[in-house]
Every structure is written in structure tokens, then in C-alpha cells.
Amino acid sequence: MIEIKDSYFKASDGNRYFRRNAPAVEVGANGDKKQPFTEANYLAVDGHIKYDLLDGKIKKQPAVEIDWARENKTDVEAYVDYYFVVGGTATFTHEKAVEDHLKLIRFNIEQSTLQRVLNHDASQVRKSMKDEGNDARVCSSAWVVVSGDLAERFNTSAGLEVSGTSTTGLSITARGDGSWSGSEKITFSPGTVFAYGLHKVKKWDGDKIEEMEDDWQSLN
């Protein structure tokens, strides 16, 4: 059952995604997982996999319907200020989510692909994770809020392109498939990420990653 709290988002698959510090996180961000004794865990971002290395590797999942009315306003609005619409963004509120039946979309990079990128292309990020030790994490997925018509465009897109700069952040562009023309771009700017998922290194083979695993938000 879906559940939204200010510290986590429990998706229909039962996994708990992180919410604290979401404005600073995007797919490919890396850093140290902080575990305050009395507060929610979160990713303290130190860097990012180069955006061009993620092109062709980030996937979109089908949009998820949310019964926003049953969720607490304060929890829903925690950390997120904007949602995506056709052509841009709009101010996000609990009332708007209920009124316009807004949806959530998850963008992610699969574990095997992420490990391959870190081992063969993103050596600086891999070295940083090795130096940080057991608390090192990398963001492998991010949820964003979208309007229904934009969700439909992404669901039917002909493909996704990844771009970005250190100034603008990560951008994902969907190309029209014939049922709609042109393109639609989502940029993970501060205040647009609703929740995020992390991966950690389970086993090292020297300086290379032998095995990774996902790391879900705990109950605190």
C-alpha cells in the first residue's frame, strides 16, 4: 500500500524511498548517507556522475496514480515545491495534487548498468565512493510529480535523451512518437524531486566494484 511521509515514500512495490534532502538529489548523485539518531536518513551529495555518461541509460517507469486526498498535506508537500507540466513547471501543493489528479513517475538506472558505468566510465565517482567507505551511496532513481497529460507524453515517447550541466542539473527529454510532436524536457532542479532511491557497494574487488545492492529508507 502506498504511503507518504515527510521522511519516506512507500511505493506500491513495498520499497521505501528517501525524501529528506530531495531538493539536492538527482539520478547519478553520489555522497555520504547520513543517519542522524533522531531524524530521517538522507544522502549528503558530494558529486555526480557526468551527465553524458547517463545518456541512453536512464529509464522511465509507468506513471503511478496517487490517492492524494488520503495523504497528509504537510507530509505530501515536504521538500517538493514544483511539479512538471507540458512545457515547464508549476507550483506544487497538496490541493493542486488532489484537484488535478497529479501523478508520480520514477526515472532510474538499473543496477547492472550503474555498476558498469562506475567501473568503466565514472572512475572519479567510484574512487570517491571507495574513499568514503561503508556510508557511500549513489542515487539510482528519482520520483517526480507530473500532470496527467505530461505523464501520457512520457509514457508514449519514442525515446529519452539525457543532458545537463553543473548549473542546470540533470535533464531528461522525451521525443514525440507520432501521437504527439516535438519534445518535453524534465530538469531535476531544486524542489522538483519528490523522493529518491539509493545503491551502495556490497563488495569491492580491489578498486573495482564486484557487487552492488539497493539501500532502502529505514523506519526512522
Image (cartoon, rainbow, N blue to C red):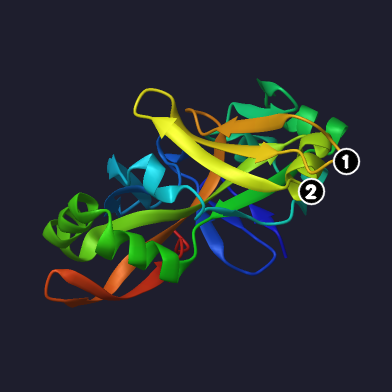
Q: How many C-alpha atoms fall within 10 Å of the one at disc 1: few (<14), some, or many (≥20)?
A: few
Q: Position of residue 109 (x, y in %)?
A: 49, 58
Residue 34 shows up from this direction: yes
Q: Is 141 in front, or is 35? A: 141
Quadrant that contains the N terminus: bottom right
Image quadrant of residue 166? Answer: top left
Residue at the image point whose x is 29% and y is 60% from the top: 118
Q: Name the N-terminal-most of marks 1 and 2.
A: 2
Query: Rounded to the nearest whole Å, what is the CA distance between mark 1 and mark 2?
Result: 8 Å
Q: Relative to residue 82, is residue 54 depicted above or below?
A: below
Residue 39 seen from this side:
no
Q: Nearer the viewer, mark 1 or mark 2?
A: 1
Residue at the image position 66 percent from the left and 48 percent from the top: 159
Quadrant placement of the C terminus = bottom left
Tell whether 11 sits left or right of 38. Answer: right
Residue 92's x, y, as percent?
A: 68, 27
- Please state which of residues 109 and 98 is positioned toward the viewer in this rendering: 109
Q: Residue furthest front?
A: 178
Question: What's the residue type where badge 1 is placed?
Answer: Ser
Q: Residue at x 16, y 62 (%)?
A: 130
Residue position marked by numbered label 1 in the rendering: 179
Tell me the quarter of the picture where residue 186 sits.
Answer: top right
Q: Which residue is mark 2?
A: 156
Residue kind at label 2, given as amino acid type: Thr
Labels in figure, total: 2
Q: Is 5 or 124 nearer to us in this picture?
A: 124
- Contact between marks 1 and 2 (CB within 8 A): the answer is yes
Secondary structure under the numbered disc 2 in the rendered image: loop
Secondary structure of residue under mark 1: loop
Q: Residues within 10 Å of mark 2 (few under 14, many from 20)?
A: some
Residue 193: horizontal and vertical position, in percent?
54, 38
Q: Position of residue 17 (x, y in %)?
A: 52, 56
